[in-house]
Amino acid sequence: MRNAFEIQGGKKLKGEIIPQGAKNEALQIISAVLLTGEKMTINNIPDIQDVNRLIELLGDMGVEVNRISRSVCTFEAKEIDQDFFNSEAFKTKGGGLRGSIMILGPLLARFGKASIPKPGGDKIGRRRLDTHFLGFEKLGARFDYNPETGFYNVDASNLRGTYILLDEASVTGTANIVMAAVLSKGTTTIYNAACEPYLQQLCKMLNRMGAKISGIASNLLTIEGVESLGGTEHTMLPDMIEIGSFIGLAAMTGSEITIKDVKYAELGMIPDVFKRLGIQMELRGDDIYIPSQDHYEIDTFIDGSLLTVADAPWPGFTPDLLSIVLVVATQAKGSVLIHQKMFESRLFFVDKLLDMGANIILCDPHRATVIGLDKQIQLRGISMTSPDIRAGVSLLIAALSAQGKSTIYNIEQIERGYQNIDARLKALGADIVRV
Ligand SMILES: CC(=O)N[C@H]1[C@@H](OP(=O)(O)OP(=O)(O)OC[C@H]2O[C@@H](n3ccc(=O)[nH]c3=O)[C@H](O)[C@@H]2O)O[C@H](CO)[C@@H](O)[C@@H]1O
Ligand SMILES: C=C(OP(=O)(O)O)C(=O)O
């Protein structure tokens, strides 16, 4: 199996790149097709493992799936094969990705019961699901977890709207509860709701299907339950995490890159965080143009103290881009403290960057101080294994900037979230071979 990339680093890249549709939005939107028996047409679907697995799972459940092209798919969830939920196939496939947890809300809303194997996803620390189940319970569901089978079973024949204060602003948790609430009786109020663009897109689509959700983009959602939902068409936003990854890639490799049609207004503080690392960029129409730059200098706080880049629930900075910020900082002038507040095992990949010659002090599992090399010393190519999706891309960026050859193993981790990444980077001049 060809599951490694061999990279000859040190080349400047040049050209235009189109971001894929957003992975984390796609997982919500595709789960939501279960809420109606009518036809749903979904555009700009990223052709990546996680999303393809979810689409396959829906097909196995009995949803009529028509893949018109790699990026457009129609779904009709007229009937669902309830026996499939007891099968080994469901255990393997459902457990294979984190996003599968979001079929629970729609299944509960429409069929009154659902079960799901403990979901997969990255090993980036503890990833609890309390918010999801506490929310379902508030709506009147009962759930149990069977440690022997590894299944969560939820029963909810009569969901009723209520006031829910989420114990944390969980992204997939909010999506799940919203999808359960749209068909519940009465009014549901969700406070401390996550409000990422993924969720805004989901809520807007649900409203087009006939749902009554207000407060979209805020952390207070009000949902008036309706009897049923109809079909609609939906187009995914460009993937903001991919856009951030490409900004980092351009800076680190000194490349001139234009990222096309980014939907800038939806990127929140992402461009500003990269600008504080000293990276120049220009908004041209709706494209981000990054000139080739040999140096970039990290800003300090106004009082002159060391800059900290930390994650926070939206509109804060997404944790999914902190690994990329970290790697880009290794070649900046100046220093920065990276504070990964949400996940406790997402910074350990810095060991690989240390092997490549980067100057980083891992203070504790959540914090790393990066002392930039200002491109005075290039990183060295090494062999490494990708531990998770974003660390994987960060290592790929490091390898593309490094002197000599690097090999990255376990690239499924990268490919579950980045579409055709080797071919797309090769088109910009990168030297990547799949081995
Ligand atoms: C499929 C999908 O969409 N995955 C994304 C989703 O995962 P997911 O929805 O699983 O992540 P959650 O938002 O539930 O939580 C992520 C982590 O942050 C912690 N937490 C969360 C909210 C909060 O207010 N305080 C807090 O500490 C949680 O305990 C957890 O450790 O959101 C994460 C956080 O943006 C992203 O990294 C994932 O890429
Ligand atoms: C952590 C991520 O994905 P998942 O939640 O699917 O593991 C991610 O997209 O960075």
Image (cartoon, rainbow, N blue to C red):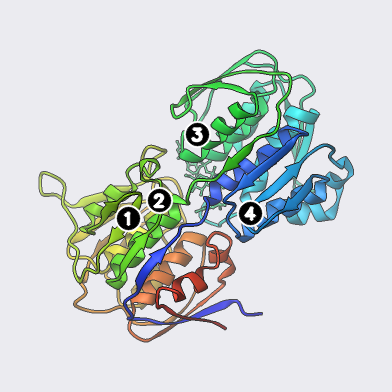
According to the picture, the residue beneath numbered tag 3 turns out to be 200
Inspect the image, locate mark 1, and give the three-letter code of the amino acid beneath it: Ile
Q: Residues within 10 Å of mark 3 (few under 14, many from 20)?
A: some
Task: Quickly name the residue at label 1.
Answer: 288
Q: CA distance from mark 3 to mark 2?
A: 17 Å
Q: Are marks 1 and 2 in contact (CB under 8 Å)?
A: yes
* Percent x, y of residue 366: 38, 52
Q: Give the quarter of the figure containing the N terminus.
A: bottom right
Question: On residue 262, which mark appears?
Answer: 2
Question: Badge 1 local density, few (<14 within 10 Å), some, or many (20+)?
Answer: many
Q: Earlier in the sequence, mark 4 or mark 1?
A: 4
* Distance between the alpha carbons at the discs numbered 3 and 4: 19 Å
Element marked by disc 4: helix
Q: Is residue 72 above or below residue 175?
A: below
Q: Please tell me whether residue 267 is drawn above or below residue 209 in the rendered image.
A: below
Disc 4 residue type? Val
Name the residue tied to disc 4.
51
